[in-house]
Amino acid sequence: MITLRDRASQALRFDDLEGRFDAWLIGIALVLAGLGVVMVASSSMPYAMSNGVGPFYYLNRHLVFLALGGVLALTVMRTEIKRIEQHSQIILLLCFAMLLAVLVPGIGKSVNGARRWINLGISNFQVVEAVKLMLIVWLASYLVRFRDEIGNSWKALFKPLIVAGALVGLLLLQPDFGSASLILAITGGMVWLGGARIRNLALPTLAGLAAMSFIVMLEPYRVKRLASFSNPWADAQDSGYQLVQALIAIGRGDLTGVGLGGSILKLDYLPEAHTDFIFSVTAEELGFVGVCCIIGLFALFTWRALRLGLRCIEMRRHFSGYCAFGIGLWISLQAFVSMGVNLGILPTKGLTLPLVSSGGSSVLMTCVAMGLLLRVSYELDRAERQKAKLRAQAPASDAVSDEELYETAPRGAAAAARLGPTTTMPATRGNRARIEPRLGAQR
């Protein structure tokens, strides 16, 4: 007969189990990065030659940042999630410090009238790219601490919204309206997934939309941009020029494209062809088939990230789950906006296509986000395997209560063993008992 002490001794070995990184996420990231290298090479050569810096200048630059991003991603993949959670308050302070540093003369750098970069000497760094990820980490930590209150307490609900509003205010001073809108959307989505009720979010959402609309009306260039978005052909040589050229490029692509490297619109017709409008060049060269592949990759990534978050919630790994939700929302929303701008269904925002567009700051921080998401998948897989082994070694004839096992076995393995297939948590929306999302046993 197996005693409780024997089971505890067996459980001690479970903490040595290694997890596995999500192969789907790794594959999606590698395919998008590979596609980005090809398209940056294709779209940037004419622009580089016209600037007299050599045809491979932007490609080499992109490869360097991609390599640095890979190193950072590997570093994050080897960092315990609990260590990241412990420093969430410091991470939030860094968000404000970095956004304020941009406005300091000598530290912040202005390009085309916008102060969005910090001068690092060898390169410029756009701080908002780091702020997006750091805000997600802080929000995840906050939702863990207040997940039982955020559905009923206005104070608990408004704190993350006020923090996001303060960050947005600093972004608008740069100005960076596109990133400000994206941060508000990420915050709203994470707060709702964390337990806030939609009816409570309705008032802040309406107030935010009204405030952002008023801010748009204060700047004539934003009003002009909206007018050109509604009818770009009315001023095709000025305010509507970018969108008109993007639509022409997409139209030329037809079903299978004009062939890799065969784009005409990248030859000094389409501005920012290797950054903001790389999707249009891709559509021209790879056609409707290529466009569908890119959309499918981002859709698959979004599904995988959200599914990973749900599995974490099932295992009561709430911080990891909310991080997965936040990264999934960020990458999917930014990809949607970037592609929407190229397709003419959204006004120009100046957001890059994650892992595909050229842009050192964006590439670096997207790689870090992927590394964090893969670390979440690693620790979740390890916890699931620990739970499965503990369950397998507890026959019905020698059944021991979960509470007894929890007191004796190591904390990580015993906590995993306590979980059943469905976990019921305290109420977070009203007084109703909340049942966490359940995906079943399939992987």
Image (cartoon, helix red, strand yellow):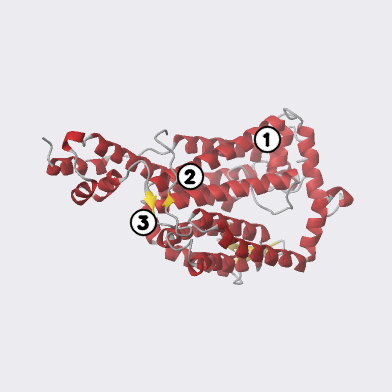
Task: Tell me the number on the disc at residue 291.
Answer: 1
- Nearer-N-terminus badge (1/2): 2
Residue closer to the observer: 69 or 158: 158
Q: Nearer the viewer, mark 1 or mark 2?
A: 1
- Which image quarter holds the C terminus? top left
Q: Can you say whether 140 is above or below 165 in the image?
A: above
Whether residue 438 sits left or right of residue 121 in the image: it is: left
Whether residue 116 sits left or right of residue 304 in the image: it is: right
Residue 132, percent from left and from top: 54, 57
Residue closer to the observer: 17 or 196: 196
Q: Can you say whether 254 is above or below 111 in the image?
A: above
Residue closer to the observer: 386 or 28: 386
Q: In this orientation, does residue 327 appear?
A: yes
Q: Residues within 10 Å of mark 3 (few under 14, many from 20)?
A: few
The residue carrying mark 2 is: 70
Cα–Cα span, label 3 and label 1: 39 Å
Residue 155, percent from left and from top: 49, 70
Cα–Cα span, label 1 and label 2: 26 Å
- Nearer-N-terminus badge (2/3): 2
Task: Tell me the number on the disc at residue 83.
Answer: 3
- Nearer-N-terminus badge (3/1): 3
Indicate the amino acid at tag 1.
Answer: Val
Q: Residue at x 83, y 49 (%)?
A: 232
- Which image quarter holds the N terminus? top left
Q: Which residue is drawn at 26% across and 44% down?
A: 15
Indicate the amino acid at tag 2.
Answer: Gly
Task: Tell me the number on the disc at residue 220.
Answer: none
